Image (cartoon, rainbow, N blue to C red):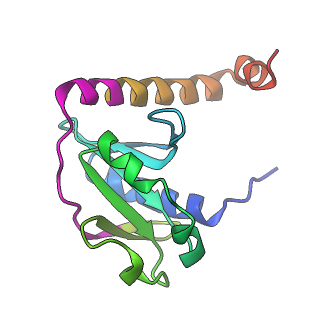
Amino acid sequence: MTKTLQPGQILARGVCRHLSSYDFVTVVELVPTPGLRVDVMALGPKGEVWVIECKSSRADFQADSKWQGYLPWCDRFFWAVDEAFPTDLLPADTGLILADAYDAQIVRMAPEDALSAPRRKVVTRTFARHAARRLQALRDPGPAQRLAQGV
């Protein structure tokens, strides 16, 4: 059974593929703190942390009231949208990535607001544990399914 990807997931796939060309590793749907879930978090080769929010439509963007809460959890913040998205809606002081299912292009580099060392440690640990859980679930889905079912 093939899972149909939602529009934001399609954008995330292209973003993740593109960022790998810069030697970034990525995870999707990461929760840096309760109440927030970022679409893509990327960890760069020098430890830099980027957050990318994928927006598939005007309504999707306008319904997002939490995005500024992501800023304390990254060095750079980007929006990822497709070429049909009205980019004039996006704040000019954020990064912009144009993406599709296969690749992406950084159109506007996000300004850097470096994480403090203690916050970077927390984010990096959260990233590593999230990635390890995902890998473990792929290797051995049985325990992960039982946990999800509360068994």
- Residue 107 left/right relative to 130: left
8 shown above or below 73 = below
Q: Quadrant of residue 106?
A: bottom left
44 shown above or below 34 = below
The image shows residue 126 at horizontal and vertical percentages of 42, 27
Q: Say which residue appears at 71% left-offset and 24% top-offset.
A: 141
The image shows residue 7 at horizontal and vertical percentages of 61, 66
Count of numbered tags: 0
The image shows residue 57 at horizontal and vertical percentages of 56, 75
71 shown above or below 117 = below
Front-most of 65 and 20? 65
For the C terminus, give its image quadrant: top right
The image shows residue 37 at horizontal and vertical percentages of 52, 44
Q: Say which residue appears at 53% left-offset and 71% top-offset.
A: 62
Front-most of 92 and 137? 92
The answer to whether residue 79 is magenta is no
- Residue 19 left/right relative to 63: left
Q: Say which residue appears at 51% left-offset and 69% top-offset.
A: 61
Range of magenta residues: 105-123
Q: Say which residue appears at 50% left-offset and 36% top-offset.
A: 31
- Residue 4 left/right relative to 89: right
Q: Quadrant of residue 103?
A: bottom left
